[in-house]
Amino acid sequence: MGETGVSVSGKQRSQNIVLKPEIQILPPVTGKNSKQEAIVSMYQGLFSRASWILDEPIAAKNLITQVFARETADLGQRVMIRAGEKFQKGDRLTVHRPREILRHPQDQRILGRISETLGIIEIVEFHGEELTAVVVKTYKEIVAGDLVDAFLNEKISIQFKEDPSFSLSAPVVYIENGLITAGLGQVVVVGLGMQDRVYPGLILPVYRTAPPLALHESKGSPRLDSLPVGEVALFRIADKASLALVTQSQDFLELGDRVGVAVSSPKSHENP
């Protein structure tokens, strides 16, 4: 079956030549990074709605001074802006509203202020130092007094990756929406910022202050090592703190959990 016998002269002969069907080569199926794709998918779904972190003290350089026709602005409505920066007609700005002050849980120093993202506006007219803008996207109603700043592109591409050489750790200082625990896909604030040389896309493990331990072989001797309770990916970086997406969770993350290198103590490396 599948064989045809031919001769050079075209006459039938006893020796057959086998004509095999062409072999189809399929593209490789192992090249895609499924973890990267899953993180990017979660990240793109929350980017615009995620909070900002404002450095203290807040300098309200760019402020909505008036909402036309009514007290609150929704999609398609116009607002007046007093701008301390140079903007152009057609520029898009993000509207946000300051919320809780972020403090380090150990020494209570201020790390910044969480700021709720409200929507996106586009500049359409200039009136001297004041600008008129139209609301082009909303998550909540916008009012006079809300702040505006440079537009954060929700389609921005970030390469998420782990960095085993990262040697710092800092606590989870806030869980978005004022929650006390966070699970997969939720956003937390970590006390690591630009001053710690972190960057968007950095993936770091999360450890409990009193961590679960695992027996580990080291140079022929057993020892106890900390086990991570989850993993986060940093995506919006401020000076002293960063927003991070929970990308892995063996347990709910809590306020005070440590992000970065494992917190070790002399006891945790003693032979059991």
Image (spheres, helix red, strand yellow):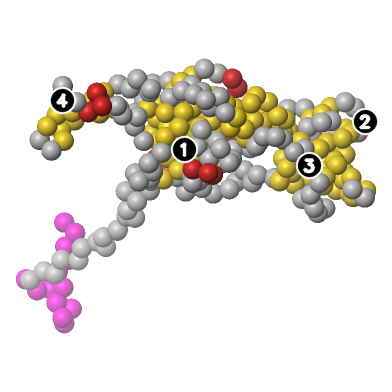
The spot of residue 83 in percent (x, y) is 83, 45
Residue 30 vs residue 232: left or right? left
How packed is label 4: few (under 14 Cα within 10 Å), some, or many (20 or more)? few
How packed is label 2: few (under 14 Cα within 10 Å), some, or many (20 or more)? few
| 2 within the magenta span | yes
Query: Visible in this render: residue 58?
Result: yes
Q: Give whichever of discs 4 and 2 has the lower sequence position.
A: 2
Magenta stretch: give its range.
1-14
User: Residue flagged by tag 3: what amino acid is it?
Assistant: Lys
- What is the CA distance from the residue labelled 4 to the residue labelled 1? 33 Å
Image quarter (top left, top right, bottom left or bottom right) of the C terminus: top left
- What is the CA distance from the residue labelled 4 to the residue labelled 3? 58 Å
User: Residue flagged by tag 4: what amino acid is it?
Assistant: Asn
Most foreground residue, 135 or 20: 135
User: Element at badge 2?
Assistant: loop
Q: Residue at x 60, y 46 (%)?
A: 155
- What is the CA distance from the residue labelled 3 to the residue labelled 1? 30 Å
- What is the CA distance from the residue labelled 4 to the residue labelled 2? 72 Å
Q: Residue at x 41, y 45 (%)?
A: 161
Q: Give whichever of discs 4 and 1 has the lower sequence position.
A: 1
Residue 200 vs residue 207: left or right? right
* Residue identifier under label 1: 233
Marking on residue 181: none
User: Residue flagged by tag 2: what amino acid is it?
Assistant: Ala
Eyeballing the image, is 30 above or below 177?
A: below
* Residue identifier under label 3: 61
* Residue identifier under label 4: 271
* Residue identifier under label 2: 69
Mark 2 touches mark 1? (CB < 8 Å): no
Mark 3 or 1, which is nearer the eye?
A: 3
Eyeballing the image, is 199 above or below 26?
A: above
